[in-house]
Image (tube, rainbow, N blue to C red):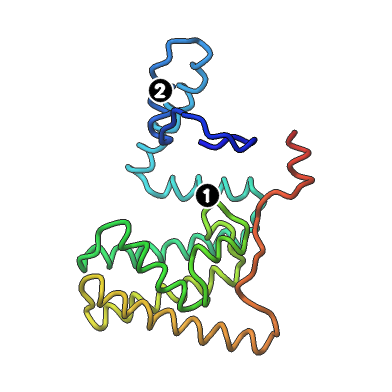
Amino acid sequence: METASGVKRNTLGGTAQHIFRLVQSIPSPKAEPFKQWLAKVGFERMQEMQDPEMGLDRARENWQKLGRSEKWIQQRMTGQDTRNKLTDYWKESGVSKSDEFAFLTNIIHQEWTGITVKNHKDLKGLKTQNLRDHMSEAELIFTALAELSTRQIAESGKAKGLIENAKAGKKGGAIAKNARKELEAKTGKSVVTGENFLPSANDKKKLK
């Protein structure tokens, strides 16, 4: 890996899963708080598997702690429900691989926004963050419209496999695109923006 000075050094690394597994194997008392946290998270995950509504409650609580408005939270959760129904249809119609999901998602997104998911994240200055968690209310609404339209078009046409669902995605995204353009013409404001919920420089100073 490249250091801050530009020198490349051999470095041991791993995924988050690997790092957590290493923490579990460390006998030091200093690692105990991390082990307790991992046990707590694991237990909460088991609870959510038995009662999915608990996961929704925790998500709402986390968004509230991050300062999101109730209106934004409701739109985010509604959009997630729409997204889940679409991915359920994809699974039932023969689309199962994660890269296929990403491919179809990008088709819908690029059709209604005019830019790819990656470019949208770049516009907002995001790196590893979830794009939807940094969307404005309008962006969430139009994303949900595009995905709802895609699912209904796919269902009515009984789309099967990647290619047919991609065609449905393009049509669904076009419906949201036309609605976006009409709104922008009326308001003079772009729906797709670089606005995000990243902490400001002042917020970072307070954390230090």
Task: Check the image and report above or below for 54 versus 118.
Answer: above
What is the CA distance from the residue labelled 1 to the residue labelled 2? 23 Å
User: How many residues crowd around disc 1 within 10 Å: few (fewer than 14), some, or many (20 or more)?
Assistant: few
Tell me where residue 71 appears, x and y as whole percent: 61, 63
Please tell me in which quadrant of the rendered image residue 147 appears.
bottom left
Tell me where residue 197 appears, x and y as whole percent: 65, 55
Tell me where residue 143 appears, x and y as whole percent: 49, 71
Label 2 sits on residue: 22
Instruction: Inspect the image, locate mark 1, and give the three-letter code of the amino acid beneath it.
Output: Thr
Kindly check if marks 1 and 2 are in contact, taking CB atoms under 8 A apart as contact. Answer: no
Label 1 sits on residue: 128
Q: Secondary structure at mark 1?
A: loop
Task: Check the image and report above or below for 139 versus 55.
Answer: below
- In this rendering, would 99 be left or right of 202? left
Instruction: Inspect the image, locate mark 2, and give the three-letter code of the amino acid beneath it.
Output: Leu
Q: Nearer the viewer, residue 22 or 155?
A: 22
User: How many residues crowd around disc 2 within 10 Å: few (fewer than 14), some, or many (20 or more)?
Assistant: few
Tell me the residue at 78%/39% (across/down).
Answer: 205
- In this rendering, would 3 be left or right of 29? right
